[in-house]
């Protein structure tokens, strides 16, 4: 247990440092925008490219694994969407944000540092592939359902163009594709470029975790919505349990692939849930509450998941 605490404590300590810094120093959020740009557009793509390009290409052919993890996440989204729609009588737009809060994990910021620290550098492969597939699903579901629930209907062509553009231009997906191509062609970067990529990769985890803490501090909670009673348990408990059930029996799958998938499913709601809520002006403050509360509680639940994974409990 102490080994797990030693692994997870520094990661959440950096989030806490960001939170404390954000509370003590009233610096404009404009500066955080540049830090987020560095993380999403430069540092994390470099991390994904570096690890994926060094991976034997055969490891990218586990479509059975990727289909099962994506369908499990879609099932979680659908469950929460239906609870919101049928039980609380929420609109399609609100139900969509709640579904995303229960299924869209923070694997962009928390996924790589936690998985690599827990299971080694090779864990970057399943992390990047899950990110690519599940982000594609989320980038498709969000605009599609928001359009269905809107009074102003967009044309099917414009909607399709918007979805495709959001997918193919996302920097982390581009970094994943570049890494897979690098593995296919067995590309070996010159030493100066590889050194630069290593430096950028090393900055990804601390910068992302610090930015999470600052974001939580700069947007304090005004109220805790009652919907979190079912959203948070679905995200932190049901999601990883379901992913484990669907991937644990895949023949020949390395343990660290199973463990990485379960860990990613156990992560709290992604900051992008709040971003999407802001974009469509739907359930904005409550979406932020889901992100913050699930992140705080994940310090306990992620620690428990890691303990089970690394000590034979799973």
Image (tube, rainbow, N blue to C red):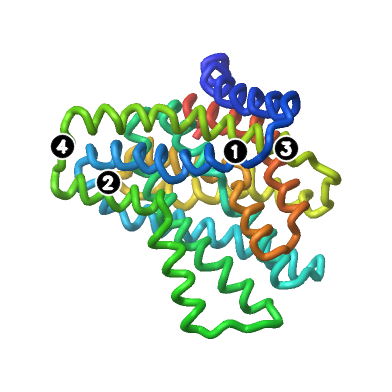
Residue farthest toward the top in the current orientation of the protein: 2
Q: Nearer the viewer, mark 4 or mark 3?
A: 3
Residue bearing mark 2 = 179
**For residue 125, above or below residue 94:** above
Measured in 3D between alpha carbons, the distance from the residue under mark 3 to the one under mark 1, in whole angstroms, is: 10 Å
Circle number at residue 218:
3
In the rendered structure, which disc, 1 or 2, sits on the residue that comes first in sequence? 1
Q: Position of residue 187 (x, y in %)?
A: 15, 42
The residue indicated by pointer 1 is: 32
Does residue 282 appear to the left or right of 171 in the view shown?
right
Per the image, the residue denoted by label 4 is 188
* Residue 251 visible in image: yes
Q: Find numbered disc 3 in the image and state the secondary structure of the residue it sits on.
A: helix
Q: Can residue 102 be seen in this snapshot?
A: no
Asked if the residue under mark 1 is in contact with the one under mark 3, i.e. CB atoms within 8 Å, the reply is: yes
The image quarter in which residue 125 lies: top left
Give the crowd class for mark 2: few <14, some 14-19, many >=20 residues within 10 Å: many
Residue for point 73% across, 63% down: 282
Whole-percent x and y of residue 310? Answer: 47, 26
Q: Nearer the viewer, residue 184 or 247?
A: 184
Mark closer to the chain start, 3 or 1:
1
Judging from the image, what secondary structure is the residue with disc 1 in? helix
* CA distance for labels 1 and 2: 28 Å
């Amino acid at each position: 247990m102490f080994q797990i605490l030693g692994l997870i404590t520094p990661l959440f300590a950096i989030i806490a440092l960001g939170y404390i810094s954000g509370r003590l120093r009233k610096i404009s959020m404009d500066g955080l925008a540049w830090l987020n740009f560095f993380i999403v557009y430069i540092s994390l793509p470099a991390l994904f490219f570096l690890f994926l390009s060094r991976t034997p290409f055969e490891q990218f052919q586990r479509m059975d694994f990727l289909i099962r993890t994506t369908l499990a996440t879609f099932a979680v989204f659908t469950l929460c969407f239906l609870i919101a729609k049928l039980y609380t009588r929420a609109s399609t737009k609100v139900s969509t944000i709640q579904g995303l809060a229960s299924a869209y994990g923070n694997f962009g910021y928390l996924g790589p540092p936690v998985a690599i620290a827990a299971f080694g550098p090779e864990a970057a492969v399943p992390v990047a592939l899950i990110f690519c597939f599940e982000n594609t699903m989320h980038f498709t579901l969000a605009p599609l359902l928001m359009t269905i629930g809107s009074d102003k209907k967009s044309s099917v062509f414009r909607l399709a163009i918007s979805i495709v553009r959001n997918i193919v231009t996302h920097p982390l997906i581009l970094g994943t594709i570049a890494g897979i191509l690098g593995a296919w062609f067995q590309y070996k970067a010159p030493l100066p470029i590889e050194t630069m990529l290593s430096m950028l990769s090393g900055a990804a985890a601390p910068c992302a975790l610090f930015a999470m803490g600052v974001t939580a501090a700069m947007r304090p909670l005004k109220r805790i919505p009652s919907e979190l009673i079912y959203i948070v348990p679905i995200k932190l408990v049901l999601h990883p349990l379901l992913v484990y059930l669907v991937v644990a029996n895949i023949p020949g799958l390395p343990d660290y692939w199973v463990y990485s998938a379960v860990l990613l499913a156990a992560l709290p709601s992604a900051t992008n849930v709040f971003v999407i809520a802001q974009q469509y002006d739907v359930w904005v403050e409550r979406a932020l509450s889901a992100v913050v509360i699930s992140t705080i509680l994940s310090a306990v639940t992620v620690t428990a998941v890691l303990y089970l994974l690394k000590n034979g409990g799973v």
